[in-house]
Amino acid sequence: MPNVVIDGTVYHYAVKMPKRDPECAIVFVHGAGGNHKHWINQVEGLGEKYLTVALDLPGHGSSGGTATNKLEEYTDFVYNFSRHVVGTGFYLAGHSMGGAIVMDFALNYSEELQGIILIGTGAKLRVAPVMLETFASGKKFPQMIDFAYGSDTSKEMLARARQEMEVTDAEVYYKDFQACDSFDIVDRLHLINSSCLIIGASQDKLTPAKYSLYLAEKIQNSKVDIIDHAGHMMMLERPQEVNIKIEQFITERSENK
């Protein structure tokens, strides 16, 4: 997996370049406690047409650095990362906490973007106190896996998710969920001016579909799609549907230029 050195620290990412010149670039940002593997189906599938990049945030996956409880620090990292790896004029996609990072990015660095893609996220991301307390104590919260996936998820996918939680430090989850818990841009959504695709899922228990519908109501120049038979991890559960919606969004944007 390739890496980039920023301010002396090595950060890892997954990337795919199409055989022909890419129509555009998409940078994918994972959610709390996650890593680039959550986007593997998007990197591979959409990478047939676009330059696709999925990063590991600081302290996550194979990246150096440390996790932070300040979401704006993740935003600044994504800005620096994209400048080093992609340049300007790209689509930025985020899931859950990653979606919060994308919205914060759009509020601060909109000139870098061709558009944004918000998946399973919300304008504020309050976290259950019991989850914060559990991770703060250094323990894991395996029940979260049951909340994160829809009813049709295979046992194999659930097993991989539990294994991933086991190898991720509880402090990473704790800092990430602190960042989520303090995130609230309800009063600033109308200031987002980037073209926006919002994808929710009918079985999402962590960021219910109503969160996506609310974003679509408040963000100008946005469209929303709700995927059936999927939960919070919809990009893993229904990758083809997610990819189709992203490709349609980018195609529509290109045709309307």
Image (spheres, helix red, strand yellow):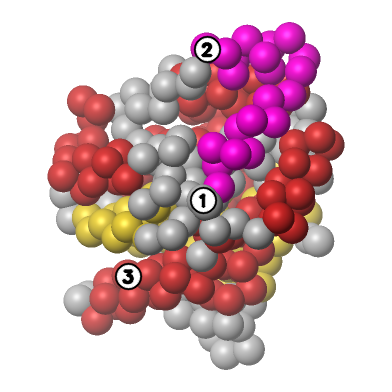
Q: Where residue 54 sits in the image (x, y, percent)?
A: 62, 57
Q: Residue at x 78, y 60 (%)?
A: 2
Sequence-wise first label, 2 or 1 = 2
> Can you tell which of label 1 and label 3 is closer to the viewer?
1
Q: Which mark is residue 249?
A: 3
Name the chief secondary structure element in magenta: helix
Please provide the residue range marked out in magenta: 129-149
Name the one closer to the observer, 137 or 181: 137
Q: Which mark is residue 150?
A: 1
User: As displayed, is residue 58 above or below residue 30?
Assistant: above
Residue at the bottom extreme of this rendering: 20
Quadrant in the rendering for residue 108? top left
Q: Is residue 214 magenta?
A: no
Residue found at x 23% / y 46%: 213
180 shown above or below 116: above
Which quarter of the image is occupied by the N terminus? bottom right
Q: Which mark is residue 9?
A: none
Q: Amino acid at mark 1?
A: Gly
In the image, what residue type sits under mark 2? Pro
